[in-house]
């Protein structure tokens, strides 16, 4: 009877022993879901790319003449860059600003130059011709999506003073407008862009307001006043002339008296002379 009882409880003990550690363990915590942070969207360009634009990400071959020639329809601008020698200044400044601000070129095409009055460029003097080309260059780099960050008025390469040769830039939507005070133009596309040089096509030649300001007129030369005659001297000279005339008249009368056969006439003339002298 005793052996049976022991044999009966033995399985129960085994179940209790092996089940106790399982009951003591706590369930593992479920992992929290991780939300992925979306990458910031790239800034939308305000100026579209032209189909023929030789866009490059390398600044090793920044030859503006070659870029404009490859883009086509910029023959007039290329010629003026060479004749005014502004291309030398632009290339030199581009080299010195590679580590800094870079350059931005607003390039009018041949159609824009054809809109000017015939002979307009040749009517400008040498200084104005150079200033007109420099007026299309900004002395810093502006990407196609950063025109709305510019503060007006914007200085140009032609700015020889804080208030001279400036433009106003207005960016809204997908449009960038340039105002000079004389011309309102629009950037129609990207000709070339890298990290330090940007060339944009502008649909009009930018004419500076400074060319429309009236030039200061030179003061008229003052004429030297003629010296005034001395009244006392002139009066004395008149008196002397009167006395001389009277003396001459008297002498003529005396000469007439000395002529023979004319005694009566001489007396008459002497009386007339005497009257004249007494006046």
Image (cartoon, rainbow, N blue to C red):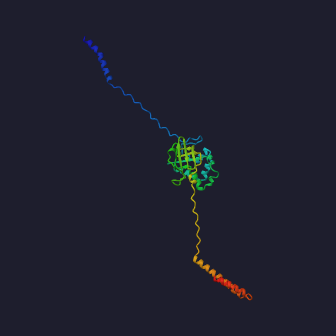
User: What number of labels is visible?
Assistant: 0
Is residue 190 visible in this depiction of the protein?
A: no
Q: Residue at x 59, y 78 (%)?
A: 235
Residue 274's spot in the image, x, y percent? 66, 84
Q: Nearer the viewer, residue 267 or 38?
A: 267
Residue 137's spot in the image, x, y percent? 55, 49
Q: Residue at x 63, y 80 (%)?
A: 242
- Most extreme residue toward the right, as rendered? 261
Residue 164's spot in the image, x, y percent? 53, 53
Q: Nearer the viewer, residue 238 or 41?
A: 238
Indicate the quadrant where residue 251 lies.
bottom right
Is residue 169 visible in this depiction of the protein?
A: yes
- Most extreme residue toward the left, as rendered? 2
Indicate the quadrant where residue 231 lies.
bottom right
- Most extreme residue toward the top, as rendered? 1
Q: Nearer the viewer, residue 62 or 172?
A: 172
Q: Residue at x 51, y 44 (%)?
A: 148
Q: Nearer the viewer, residue 68 or 59?
A: 68
Residue 128's spot in the image, x, y percent? 58, 54
Question: Looking at the image, is 230 positioned above or below residue 169?
Answer: below
Q: Quadrant of the N terminus?
A: top left
Please give left or right for residue 82 compared with residue 28 in the image: right
Q: Residue at x 29, y 16 (%)?
A: 10
Q: Quadrant of the C terminus?
A: bottom right
Indicate the quadrant where residue 23 lies.
top left
Please give left or right for residue 125 compared with residue 21 in the image: right
């Amino acid at each position: 009877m005793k052996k049976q009882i022991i044999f009966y409880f033995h399985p129960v003990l085994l179940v209790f022993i092996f089940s106790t550690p399982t009951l003591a363990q706590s369930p593992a915590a479920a992992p929290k879901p991780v939300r992925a942070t979306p990458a910031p969207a790239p800034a939308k360009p305000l100026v579209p790319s032209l189909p023929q634009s030789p866009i490059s990400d390398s600044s090793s071959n920044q030859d503006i003449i070659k870029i404009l020639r490859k883009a086509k329809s910029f023959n007039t601008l290329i010629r003026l860059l060479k004749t005014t020698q502004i291309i030398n200044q632009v290339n030199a400044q581009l080299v010195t600003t590679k580590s800094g601000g870079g350059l931005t070129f607003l390039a009018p095409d041949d159609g824009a130059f054809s809109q000017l009055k015939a002979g307009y460029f040749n009517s400008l003097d040498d200084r104005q011709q150079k200033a007109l080309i420099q007026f299309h260059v900004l002395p810093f780099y502006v990407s196609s999506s950063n025109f709305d960050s510019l503060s007006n008025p914007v200085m140009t390469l032609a700015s020889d003073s804080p208030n001279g040769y400036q433009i106003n830039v207005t960016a809204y939507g997908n449009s960038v407008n340039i105002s000079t005070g004389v011309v309102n133009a629009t950037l129609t596309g990207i000709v070339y862009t890298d990290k330090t040089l940007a060339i944009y096509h502008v649909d009009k030649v930018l004419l500076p307001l400074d060319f429309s300001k009236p030039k200061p007129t030179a003061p008229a030369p003052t004429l030297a006043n003629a010296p005034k005659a001395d009244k006392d001297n002139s009066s004395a000279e008149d008196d002397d002339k009167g006395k001389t005339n009277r003396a001459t008249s008297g002498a003529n009368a005396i000469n007439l008296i000395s002529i023979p056969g004319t005694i009566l006439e001489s007396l008459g003339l002497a009386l007339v002379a005497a009257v004249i002298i007494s006046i």
